Each structure stands twice: as C-alpha cells, then as structure tokens.
C-alpha cells in the first residue's frame, strides 16, 4: 500500500460559534484562508502552509485511489474530443460593413475572433486566444466587442481563474493593443456611439461589481470618470446596450429586485437617468425603439412576467402600459426589439418557443418544435434594422442547429449544424420526458436519454443531474459528453426540480428561501420514479451537480444516502450557513434574497441550519462522494468542499470512498481551455463508471 492509499485526516481545531444565542461547533474553520483575497489573486503562493499541505494531500489521495482509471480517463477524453470539430467556427454575424465571428484552430484551446467584409473578402484576425494564452496556466477570455466605427476592439481576460478581468483596447488596423489597460474589471466594455469612450464595471477588493467608470480611449485609466456607484453590497451591477445601440444600460439587481439607469449612447457624458426606483420583489429589464422603452417586468402581480411600454421622456412606473399581458403559467424569459418587430422567448408547459410581434399592427406568430424535450436559444445579433433573427435548436438526441429566420417571409434557413466528427446516429438514441410525482402532489419533469439497446429492467446505471437554484432552467439540449456514458449503458437524466423556472416563475419561488427543501425532495422523488419505471436501481444511480447543484448533492447525501450509489459534487456550495453569515465574501449579500439572511433573521438561520450540507453531516453510511474545488474560485470558495470532505471522513460510519480534487490553478469553471475542460469531465465520468462497477 502506497503512502497515498490512506485518506488524509484534517486536524480538528474546534471553534465555537454563536449566532442568535445558538451555539455550533466547527472543527475545520482553519481551512478558510484569512487572506482569501490574496489567494484569489495569487493562488497557491498565498496559501498558509498547513492549508496547502492538506489540499495537496487530498489531491494525492484522489490521484492514488483513481490511478487504475487513468487509461479509462484517456479513452473518455479521446472520445469526447473526437466529437468536437477541432477547427470549428461560428456563423459570422452581420454588423454594418462587416460580419463578425469566432473560430478555433485545429487543436486550439481558445477562441479566435475574426471579421470579414459583409459581402465577402479577406478575413481579418481580431484576437487570437491561443496566442494570448501562451505561457499561462489559466486563461479565459471575458468577451470581445467592436466599436461602432469598427476601428477598435474592447476585450478582457482572466489569467487566474478568480474572475478579475483585465480590459484592453485594440487598434484593429494595426492589431496592437493601446496603452488603455484596466485591471480588476468584471469583463468586457461598452462603447459610446462615437467610439470615443468605453464604459466598464470595476470590482472592489471583495470582488463586488460596485462602480461604473467611463474611460476615454487613449487616456490614462487612473483618470477615468466614476459614472455610477452602487452603495448596497447586496446588489450586482452590469452595463450593456440596447439592440438599437441608442441607449447604454446600467443594470442593478439581486435575485428578486432590479433597477435600471440609462445614458444616451450619443451623449456619453450625460448623467444617468433612472427608469424606475427599486422595489423589493419587482424585476424589470429594458430595450428601446425610438422614443419608447419596451420593458419586461413582473410588476403588477405579473408573476410570469409581461411586457410594457413607457415613453423615454417619463419612463416611471406610472407611465407603463401593457403591451404583452401577463399569462399565468407562460413565463416570458427575454425580449428584443428591432426596427419593425419584437421577439420574445417564453416557456409554457416546460417547453420554449419564440414569438415574433410585428410592431406596425401587433400581429404575432411563433416558432416552436414538436419533440418531447428540446432546447431553444435566441441571439440578438448586432443589427437593429433587419428582418432576420438567428436562433438555435437542439434536443438530447439532435445536435445543435443554427437557423436564420426571416420574420416577413417566415423562411427558415439552416446556417450550421453541429458536426460530430467521430459520428452520431440520431436513431441509435431515445429521449423521453417523464413526470415524477412529488410528495406534495406536484410533478417533477425529468428528461432522459439512453441508447436504444439499453435494457430498461432496472439493471442499467444512471447519471441523474440536477441544479435547482436562482431560477436557472437546465435545457434538454444535445450534450456530446453524455454520449460516452450512454454508449456504455448508462441512462442520462436531468431532473427539472423546483428552484429553476422549468414550470414557470412559481416553480422557482417554491424552491428558494423557506421552500428550499422542495429542491432536494424533488430530486429524490425523481430518483424514486426512475427506479419505479425500471430505468435503474438506487445503488446504480450516480447523482451529479455543481455549485448550487453541489449543495443539492450534499443535501441529498444527508437526507437519503441509501438512494444513491455515488455523488459527484463540482465546486459544491455545501457550507451554506457559514457563507451566508460571512458578509465579507463576494456573493453573500446579493445571495440573501435567494437563501435568506441568517445574520438578521433567526428563522432564516434556523432554516438554513436545518439543511446546510456541512452542518448536517452525521454518523451514517454515505454513498461514494467525489468533490471538486477550484482554489481561486470567488463564487464557491475552495474551503467549502474541503471542510465538507474533512467532516465526512471524520464522521461517516461506513467505508464509502470520499475524494476531494482541488484544481490549484483554476476557479469556478475549472480548466479554461475547451480540451482541458474535457479532462475534468473524463475524470468525473471515470468516477461514475467506477461507482457503477464499470471501471
């Protein structure tokens, strides 16, 4: 037996914590780096020796216990890479005299941004991601956007995984970056109409997007003008532009309340003007057309949202007029306004559709599909005066297809179909949607994919994925990576649990704050139903979730460990109570509307304490668990999974395998390159196959 065959045991250093008169003991507080801000910026070099030693020991143990899967990991990686077109490219999107797109070189990890003359001609390279990433262990582009005069490119990158982006401005003609180098931004910038200024968000030391600046191209960034500052640490701030290009939009929001301020793009030094003051629980977002704002909102008890109009001269709520009325159960997700029409993406009965409304007479028609489960996406493009929109469609069996759609003729033109170089035969696979009964009478949609030759007699292993927070809906889209498991006899399933918006906004409300436990019980109900339908058996189900979905993994491990053979928890938010009590962390104040504020609200404290995965680890037999962390992760700090694994090891009664893998050179999203990320997926799948007795 090698020295790494025995699991590390973190030293217990008990600390008694007291809130609302309630005491709790935490043995592993010491794994939280007091200098976490430095760790976000400098990584391993800033870690205390004892923390670094523990994380290294866990990594060595994980590597030793999964050493026998190395060949399998390489095989899985080769399969997944083989399904990716190595020199893939997007369909260029028109913008004035040019069309802009991105592509990958054969073997390249990072995107390359380019443009061509709209009517054909020589391609111009704007940004070569692989060249920019040379010599860096981590590199992620934060986006790139051209100026209205097409002479400049504002682009941003993160080379630590901490999501502190450096913003630069490039002269497109020369291909050289100007001296305009701005640190610690949220990524990306928005140009004024005259291309003279770029607006950007700067993050503070606690990683909060609190200040909007205006930078004049060619000047020293230290002289940039502060345009807007958000004083409430509980709100995020972003900057964008309407489809028309007429209005710069300052968007301020948490998870239930929003406020928008605007600046005319052709008057960039003007003071921001408020649309409507924030009201708790009221959300809205805007687009514009001439002298009118088009506003998507839940105001006026429009739980599933509606679209209203307001004059730009007086855009307050008193002047909002319904355009698309609220329809209960039909959730309006987004809208976009063009010169002669408006589009909206909505979801009803769990399925999405695109609705086109002609502005001249308000006549509508829709784009929808007939499969049981599918994914539909809509891109705004760059142009306002157009009759063409672009959308994408896929299902769990059908590769993604990109269409251009003429809203006048209703002609649909296929512009691109996702290629699977190693081959993909749609007829070899089956996709279905089941409805799992929950204990309170609700039904939980479950999307499933399996090979047509898989025996559905309860013997098949099954990977059950879930998220269930922030209103995020997991689409039933094509996932080439899932095919490696499906081709090995797995059933792949997605549980569309409460906390997402799969069945409307109500589905989200019933899975947050004081209703959060519905998320967990829905997932368990989905597992029970899949077993009842003989798609698998409990000991062969491997559950998978990341971030808030990782919290789901920790919760079900405590609630129903006997119903899962294994759990994969990526960057898992498992120390919920401690994090929500720590208002210095980047995301804590903005997260209180989602989880509750345990600092000021004793009931919220007690409810979170009743399900927080770390706090509810007890002496019981747990399923096999694989936790994955990122050292520079600003969203779910590395110490959450580290503490969880330490406590599981010290507390569980069985001998189930518990592993922790900390990526010492990445953050929340894992490895940054398109192929390097596949190595992490292959590692996860190897664990699932190992649990299922197939590795």
Image (cartoon, helix red, strand yellow):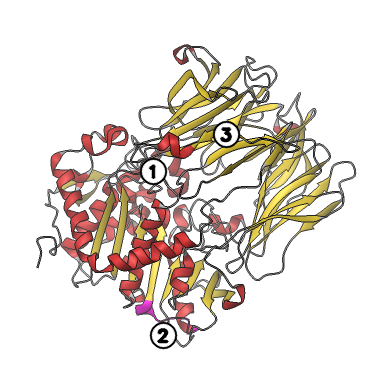
Task: List the residue tagged with mark 1.
Answer: 635
Front one among 492 and 581 = 492
* Residue 126 place in picture, x, y as percent: 56, 32
Say if mark 1 contacts mark 2, CB within 8 Å: no
Asked whether residue 514 is drawn in magenta, I would say no
* Residue 177 place in picture, x, y as percent: 50, 22
Q: Which mark is residue 125?
A: 3
Quarter of the image that includes the N terminus: bottom left
**Numbered disc total:** 3
What's the magenta region?
533-540
Query: What residue is at 35 percent from the left and 59 percent from the top?
Result: 569
| Residue with the most extreme bottom position | 457
Q: Nearer the viewer, mark 3 or mark 1?
A: 3
Task: List the residue tagged with mark 2.
Answer: 459
Q: Earlier in the sequence, mark 3 or mark 2?
A: 3
* Residue 411 place in picture, x, y as percent: 82, 55
């Amino acid at each position: 037996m090698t020295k790494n065959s025995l699991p590390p045991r973190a030293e217990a250093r008990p600390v008694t914590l007291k809130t609302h008169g309630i005491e709790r003991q935490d043995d592993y507080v010491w794994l939280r780096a007091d200098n976490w801000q430095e760790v976000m910026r400098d990584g391993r070099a800033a870690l205390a020796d004892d923390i670094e030693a523990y994380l290294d020991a866990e990594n060595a143990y994980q590597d030793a216990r999964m050493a026998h899967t190395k060949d399998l990991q390489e095989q899985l990686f080769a399969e997944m890479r083989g399904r990716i077109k190595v020199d893939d490219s997007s369909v260029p999107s028109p913008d004035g005299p040019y069309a802009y797109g991105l592509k990958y070189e054969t073997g390249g990890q990072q995107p390359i941004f380019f443009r061509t003359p709209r009517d054909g001609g020589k391609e111009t390279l704007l940004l070569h991601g692989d060249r920019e990433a040379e010599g860096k262990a981590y590199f992620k582009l934060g986006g790139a956007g051209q100026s209205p005069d097409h002479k400049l490119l504002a682009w941003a990158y993160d080379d630590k995984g901490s999501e502190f982006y450096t913003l630069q401005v490039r002269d497109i003609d020369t291909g050289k970056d100007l001296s305009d180098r701005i640190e610690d931004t949220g990524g990306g910038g928005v140009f004024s109409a005259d291309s003279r200024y770029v607006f950007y968000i700067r993050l503070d030391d606690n990683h909060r997007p609190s200040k909007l600046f205006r930078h004049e191209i060619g000047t020293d960034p230290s002289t940039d003008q502060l345009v807007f500052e958000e004083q409430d640490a509980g709100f995020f701030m972003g900057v964008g532009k309407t489809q028309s290009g007429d209005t710069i939009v300052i968007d301020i929001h948490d998870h239930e309340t929003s406020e928008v301020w605007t600046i005319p793009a052709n008057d960039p030094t003007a003071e921001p003007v408020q649309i409507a003051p924030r009201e708790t629980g009221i959300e809205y977002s805007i687009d514009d057309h001439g002298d009118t704002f088009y506003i998507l909102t839940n105001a006026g008890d429009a739980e599933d949202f509606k679209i209203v109009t307001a004059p730009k001269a007086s855009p307050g709520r008193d002047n909002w007029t319904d355009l698309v009325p609220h329809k209960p159960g039909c959730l309006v997700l987004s809208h976009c306004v063009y010169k002669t029409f408006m589009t909206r993406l909505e979801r009803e009965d769990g399925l999405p559709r695109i609705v086109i409304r002609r502005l001249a007479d308000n006549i509508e028609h829709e784009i929808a599909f007939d499969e049981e489960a599918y994914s539909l996406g809509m891109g705004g493009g760059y142009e306002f005066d157009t009759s063409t929109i672009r959308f994408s469609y896929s299902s769990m069996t059908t590769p993604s297809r990109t269409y251009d759609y003429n809203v006048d003729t209703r002609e649909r033109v296929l512009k691109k179909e996702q290629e699977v170089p190693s081959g993909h035969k749609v007829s070899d696979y089956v996709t279905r949607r089941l409805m799992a009964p929950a204990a309170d009478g609700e039904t939980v949609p479950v999307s499933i994919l399996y090979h047509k030759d898989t025996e559905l007699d309860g013997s098949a292993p099954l990977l059950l994925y879930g998220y269930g927070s922030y209103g995020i809906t997991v689409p039933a889209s094509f996932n080439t990576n899932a095919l490696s498991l499906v081709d090995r006899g797995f059933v792949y399933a997605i549980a569309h649990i409460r906390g997402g918006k799969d069945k409307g906004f109500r589905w989200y409300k019933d899975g947050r704050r004081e209703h959060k436990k519905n998320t967990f019980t829905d997932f368990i109900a989905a597992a029970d139903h899949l077993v009842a339908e003989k798609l698998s058996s409990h000991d062969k189900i491997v559950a998978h979730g990341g971030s808030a979905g990782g919290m789901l993994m920790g919760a079900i491990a405590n609630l129903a460990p006997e119903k899962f053979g294994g759990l994969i928890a990526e960057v898992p938010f498992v120390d919920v109570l401690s994090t929500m009590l720590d208002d210095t962390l980047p995301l804590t104040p903005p997260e209180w509307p989602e989880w509750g504020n345990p600092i000021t609200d004793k009931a919220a404290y007690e409810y979170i304490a009743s399900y927080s995965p770390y706090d509810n680890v007890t002496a019981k037999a747990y399923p096999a668990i694989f936790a994955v962390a990122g050292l520079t992760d600003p969203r779910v700090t590395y110490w959450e999974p580290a503490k969880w694994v330490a406590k599981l090891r010290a507390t569980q009664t069985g001998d189930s395998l518990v592993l922790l893998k900390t990526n010492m050179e990445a953050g929340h999203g894992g490895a940054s390159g398109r192929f390097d990320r596949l190595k992490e997926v292959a590692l996860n799948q190897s664990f699932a196959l190992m649990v299922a007795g197939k590795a």
